[in-house]
Amino acid sequence: MNFAGTQKVLVADDDVVNRQVLAELLKPEHTVVLAKNGAQALELAARHLPDLMLLDVVMPDMDGYEVLRRLRTDPRTAHITVIFISGLGRPEDEANGLKLGAADYIAKPFNTTVVMARVAMHLQMVRQRRMLEHLAHVDGLTELANRRRFDEVFEAEWQRCRRNGRPLSLAMLDIDAFKQYNDHYGHPAGDRALRAVARTSASGLRRPGDLAARYGGEELVLLMPDTDAAQAQQVVIAICTAIAGLGIAHEASAVAPVLTVSAGGATLVGAGADPIETCTELFAATDRLLYQAKKSGRNRVEW
Ligand code: GH3
Ligand code: MG
Ligand code: MG
Ligand code: MG
């Protein structure tokens, strides 16, 4: 994951001179997007998802306060760092801007050196926040979502599918005879194999809302919202087949000459008399079916 790339700044001001001055200041180091009114600021923020916004307060169509309020209601733009840059220079104006959730407040006429220094400081904080979010949500070995992230998404998708009467499918994968693999080929080779299994699982998912996560040691979970049992089963079988198809030699396995996985999967139907009522039950069902796949010989999918 690269956190060092060029960052994007959106400047919204109804005054053309202010826009130009700020753009010239920022352009050498950052990608700059310009908006000349509040409505355009909202539209461009949603389209470009900037790292930072320099937002004028007094604009004829929609003031900066309202722009910020609306940004916060859209999950895509809710976390964008906003700095107000305004001719309203009273302490109450500044306090009000910060109370609304701006990260900073710069009074006009602004000093270019100070604007640059504050922008640099806030962009650095954005970078650090992204790194922390990455560390909190991504498993270091496989680069898949970690268990914490999975738990969050699972709960949210559960609620959403339940509310909308949509199906939600979940599968759990576990590598077969992985202890023997480590014993035979060594732990570093085991790590490489696990990474390959993770990559193949993630790339076998078909929709943007699907999630592959590392649940524990060599156990992965696949979450597929809006996917019924037949579709999900097909995806999981294809993934397990692709993993075996990697052809990672496993001489010590009694299952097959190559590394294989077993999987259990279950689906919340989302309507009618569904015996699965909670996400804990859905999870328990996949776990049970994984155990069944193991017991009945491994290298198979039970649904
Ligand atoms: P089964 O077919 O029943 O799943 O057998 P198994 O040997 O895979 O199952 P078991 O749960 O007994 O062992 C899991 C092994 O996975 C043990 C552990 O050393 C290995 N493992 C877990 N996490 C990692 C990891 O991050 N790297 C490596 N190399 N091995 C791991
Ligand atoms: Mg203005
Ligand atoms: Mg296991
Ligand atoms: Mg295993």
Image (cartoon, grey):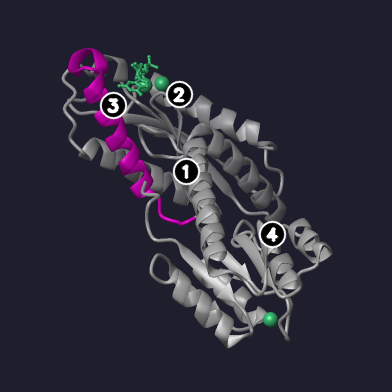
**Whether residue 296 can be seen here:** no
Q: Is residue 185 magenta?
A: yes
151, above or below 80, in the image: above
Judged left or right of residue 206, residue 57 is right
- The residue labelled by disc 3 is 191
Who comes first in sequence, dot 2 or dot 3? 3
Who comes first in sequence, dot 3 or dot 4? 4
In magenta, the rendered stretch is 182-208
Number of other residues with Cα within 10 Å of mark 1, as a class: few under 14, some 14 to 19, many 20 or more: some
Asked if labels 3 and 2 touch by Cβ distance under 8 angstroms, the answer is no
Q: CA distance from mark 1 to mark 3?
A: 23 Å
Q: Tag on residue 131?
A: 1
Nearest the eye: 8 or 179: 8
Q: CA distance from mark 1 to mark 2?
A: 40 Å
Nearest the eye: 121 or 148: 121
Asked if labels 3 and 1 touch by Cβ distance under 8 angstroms, the answer is no
Number of other residues with Cα within 10 Å of mark 4, as a class: few under 14, some 14 to 19, many 20 or more: many
Q: Amino acid at mark 4?
A: Ala
Ligand 1 closer than 8 Å to the CB at disc 3?
A: yes
Q: Position of residue 173 (x, y in %)?
A: 41, 32
Judged left or right of residue 93, residue 8 is left
Q: Position of residue 35 (x, y in %)?
A: 57, 80
Which type of secondary structure does the marked residue at label 2 adopt? helix
Q: Amino acid at mark 2?
A: Gln
- The residue labelled by disc 2 is 292
Ligand 1 closer than 8 Å to the CB at disc 2?
A: no
Who comes first in sequence, dot 2 or dot 4? 4
Q: CA distance from mark 3 to mark 4?
A: 44 Å
Q: CA distance from mark 2 to mark 4?
A: 54 Å
Nearest the eye: 196 or 5: 5
Who comes first in sequence, dot 1 or dot 3? 1
- The residue labelled by disc 4 is 102
